[in-house]
Amino acid sequence: MADRLSINDNRTGNKHELTLSYGTHVNAGSAISAKDLREIKTSDQDFGVLVHDPGFMNTSACKSSITFIDGEAGILLYRGYPIEELASKSTYLEVAYLLLHGELPNESQLDIWTTDITNHTFLNEKIKKFLDGFRYDAHPMGILVSALASLSTFYPKSRNVQDEEIRARSIRRLIAKIPTLAAFAYRYSVGLPYAYPDNDLSYSGNFLNMMFRATETKYNPDPVLEKTLDVLLILHADHEQNCSTSAMRAVGSSDADPYVSVSAATAGLYGPLHGGANERVLEMLSEIGTVKNIGAYIEKVKQGEFRLMGFGHRVYKNFDPRAKILKNLAEQVFEVTGRNELLDIAVELENVALNDDYFVKRKLYPNVDFYSGIIYQAMGIPVEMFPVLFAIGRTSGWLSHWEEMRRDPELRIARPRQMYTGYPKRDYLKIDARQ
Ligand code: ACO
């Protein structure tokens, strides 16, 4: 017999039995169906009980088998594989395949997948005219959000979201084209001519080529930096039902096509509390300026003047495992690029915060954004591109959730309820009767 939860309604004296369902991991939690709560009423006219959960602190919006996070233990698994193993042994394209298909590809599957993605990296030339309309100093994230949505008009068949083959093609196109769009957005914003994809290079190597190629006929990415970028993309690839993924699912649930849905997800990522945080981490480290100013800065954070960017997480209440990987990676990158004082400030800031009661009590640890910004900067990637890089990595995660959602028999349009707290019904006031 299924496990049940009993609720005694002391308004009516009725007892209600709610069925519990469980996730597959020991710490995945159990859930009741929120709809069952609607049966708990005081009369037939009563609407029933709602769950009030601003910010979705404790609401399961879907069943998903893609990513598991144990925030208390600092565990992150993609399709069951620990992030640490994927970061050290896999590649971004292989991880994207894993997220989308549920299993690691065999050799021939990986070959076909890589060729498919590589064959879709070019953009329709008209996109360049579209980009021309932006102001000379447009933020590349704003350009990316718009350019992604514009792809929907280039591929109108993608609106048929019921067709599995069309969905698969859209997915391949998006994963292939987002680095090109992103690099074009950057080159436009700094007035450089566009560098076209080089399909002989790896996914990450090609992105560096499109960002940095100058007059050379063949761009050869530094292997350490190419690997580092690949690891960063792996670490950002998915993080279950975060703000941008929830936007992807919410917009996609209306049967919107994947291009506008990924555009909406990218907009969600743009905010400084989500993907924009690494940009803010760098601003913060530059503002601190030197290790000896850290104490005074921390005091201001504790006074509530502002937050320590790159610290804290809705789910991780222990170390963010991605931050641990990045801290080690930062040291390797600095061996190639030379040391940067910001890393010293970051390391010391982390030390001070982790030993301070304010942060310990609130379980505030460095998150993925704390070190990613410093690494990107050392690689020569401009600050405005940080959230753009996050979007490139997260695209495979967004699309995995979108595909999972499309196949989910429980799929309904996302339409939360509310606790109405306004006026009861009242009569219209003529203008001369208003105060
Ligand atoms: N610096 C200082 N204090 C903080 C911080 C921080 N970075 N984050 C949380 N707190 C404090 C809050 O003031 C609050 O204290 P109080 O209980 O005394 O009021 C307590 O910790 C709980 O904070 P909440 O805002 O309730 O935590 P929530 O889970 O809603 O927020 C969030 C999570 C948005 C990530 C938050 O920690 C934050 O703003 N961090 C800085 C921005 C950042 O780094 N974002 C990147 C997140 S990772 C990602 O998106 C990839």
Image (tube, rainbow, N blue to C red):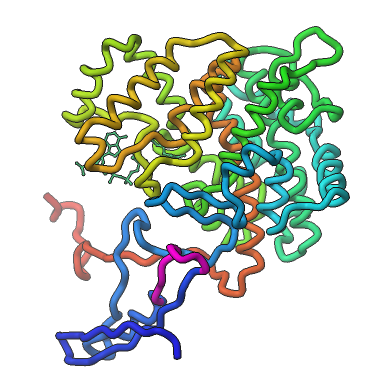
**Which quarter of the figure has residue 121?**
top right
Instruction: Locate the N terminus and report the quarter of the image it occupies.
Output: bottom left
Looking at the image, residue 305 lies above or below residue 50: above
Looking at the image, residue 188 lies above or below residue 395: above
Q: What are the residue bounds of the magenta stretch?
A: 24-32
Which SS type dominates the magenta stretch? loop
Q: Is residue 278 visible?
A: yes
Q: Is residue 357 left or right of residue 313?
A: left
Looking at the image, residue 190 lies above or below residue 389: above
Please tell me which residue is depicted at 26% across the width and 28% down the height of the picture: 306
Q: Is residue 138 visible?
A: no
Q: Position of residue 130 (x, y in %)?
A: 69, 29
Q: Position of residue 115 (x, y in %)?
A: 86, 41
Front-most of residues 141 and 279: 279
Please tell me which residue is depicted at 71% across the width and 42% down the height of the picture: 175
Q: Position of residue 13 (x, y in %)?
A: 17, 92
Give the mark count. Answer: 0
Looking at the image, residue 262 lies above or below residue 413: above
**Which quarter of the figure has residue 52?**
bottom left
Q: Is residue 44 left or right of residue 34?
A: left
Please tell me which residue is depicted at 14% across the width and 53% down the height of the picture: 434
Q: Position of residue 380 (x, y in %)?
A: 59, 15
Front-most of residues 310 and 351: 351
Please tell me which residue is depicted at 32% across the width and 64% down the height of the picture: 418
Is residue 31 found inside the magenta-colored segment of the image? yes
Is residue 97 found inside the magenta-colored segment of the image? no
Q: Quadrant of ligand 1?
A: top left
